Amino acid sequence: MRYPVISMEKTGKRIREICERQGICAREIQEYMGFSAAQSVYDWFRGKNLPSVDNLYALSRLLKVTMETLVVASDQEEAWGVCEIAVLPRMDRHKIVVKYRELLWGPGVS
């Protein structure tokens, strides 16, 4: 078993893509976090730095995803199928899960 390491580049890309999908820009994150400038957010997007645990938690709340959804391990392949579902509104996620279960086990299974 190898020690897991977070990829700053992949994590930054994931954060940027989730923000883009939700229409949230760096300035909005800056204001939400109370930063004096958006540079820290741009650094996250570029994979130059990672958010602190507190900032990662706040960002996950803003984006309505889990912290784990935002973080990508260095040995992890991009699994956007899962993340795309995670960034959908709750009702849409439920519909997708129900549809997936129906495909696996047949209609009426929930």
Image: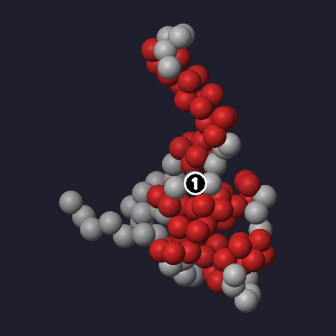
Q: Residue at 65% x, 58% y: name it.
A: 63
Q: Label 1 is placed on what type of residue?
A: Val
Q: Is residue 64 left or right of residue 78?
A: right
Q: Residue furthest left?
A: 1
Residue found 74% across the figure and 59% down from its top: 20
Q: Is residue 88 toward the left or the right of residue 53 in the image?
A: right
Taking 20 as reference, is 105 above or below it? above
Classify 109 as above or below 70: above
Q: Is residue 32 left or right of residue 106?
A: right
For this orientation, the residue located farthest to the top is 107
Asked if residue 9 can be seen in this view, the reply is no
Residue displayed at 59% across by 32% down: 94
In the rendered image, residue 30, in percent from the top left (x then y), is placed at 72, 78
Q: Position of residue 50 (x, y in %)?
A: 52, 77
Q: Nearer the viewer, residue 108 or 25?
A: 108
Q: Position of residue 103 (x, y in %)?
A: 52, 18
Seen in the picture, residue 3 relative to 36 is either above or below; the reply is above
Residue under label 1, please give it: 65
Q: Tell me which corner region of the image, top left, top right, bottom left or bottom right, holds residue 84.
A: top right
Q: Residues within 10 Å of mark 1 (few under 14, many from 20)?
A: some
Instruction: Out of 2 and 91, give the one closest to the viewer.
Output: 91
Is 21 placed left or right of 90 in the picture? right
Is there any visible trace of residue 23 in the rendered image? Answer: yes
Q: Position of residue 37 (x, y in %)?
A: 74, 87
